[in-house]
Image: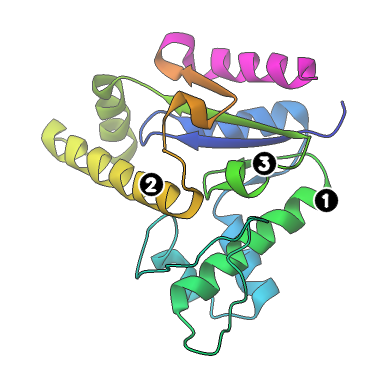
Amino acid sequence: MKKAIIAIGRQYGSEGRKIGQKLAADLNIPFYDKEILSRAAEESGLYAGLFSGYDEKTKGLMLNMISNNYSLGPVVNSNEVTVDRMVMQAVFDTLRNIAKEGSCVIIGRCADYILEKDPALLSAFIYAPMEDRIKTVMERSNIKNSEEARRIILRTDRQRASYYNFYTMKKWGRVESYDVCLNSSVFGVDGTVNLLKEIVLNKE
């Protein structure tokens, strides 16, 4: 298989992470999710505990966050150093380093935008109907109340959308933001994985 970088965005409860894991296993390539944060901390020298608080969440304001080459620009300027600026610079630099190493599956963290100039990139968004996501979250997190599950889903999706829209200047979950969008409730986890494999193997 030629080099393939699969960046997966996902609605909460759509099984996007599980799909990414199975896809990486089937293709025998690395899988990156939370691992990105620990690696970014190691490579940047920043305190690892900072990263969880900024993971796919927007904190603070960054008016000049992304330049034309998809960088947040210099972490240090003459006026101020912000924690969110340093953390996100570290994460995005790590994504670029990961992409240089070869084929992989990356979950979230604006990877589709940061790596969009890489010809090996395939960006995908996984979604599912709310009722199916509520069921998944209730089972996965042992939540008994469907309204509580719904609130968690809406809050998490809102955080992910805010993060993505802020750092990419695109719209999270919009079909035009990705190469392919798949409903995991229609195809199932295995079916969605199989479809993505076929798309990867047939991508020009």
- Residue 136 drawn at (x, y percent): 32, 28
Give the mark nearest the N terminus, 3 or 2: 3
Kind of residue at badge 2: Arg
Q: Nearer the viewer, residue 15 or 62?
A: 62
Residue 137 is tagged as none
Say whether marks 2 and 1 touch (CB < 8 Å). Answer: no
Q: Is residue 17 visible?
A: no
Q: Please name the residue that numbered disc 3 is placed on.
A: 116
- Residue 152 drawn at (x, y percent): 23, 43
76 shown above or below 92: below
Q: Please name the residue that numbered disc 2 is placed on.
A: 160
Q: Nearer the viewer, residue 175 or 135?
A: 175
Magenta stretch: give its range: 186-204
Q: Is residue 195 magenta?
A: yes
Occupied quadrant, residue 113: top right
Say which quadrant the C terminus sits in. top right
Give the number of the mark in front: 1 or 3. 3
Report how far apart the C-alphas of labels 2 and 1 lie in the structure. Answer: 27 Å
166 shown above or below 50: above
**97 with respect to 41 (left or right):** right
Report how far apart the C-alphas of labels 1 and 3 lie in the structure. Answer: 16 Å
Q: Residue furthest right?
A: 2
- Residue 151 drawn at (x, y percent): 17, 41
Say whether marks 3 and 2 touch (CB < 8 Å). Answer: no
Q: Please name the residue that numbered disc 1 is placed on.
A: 101
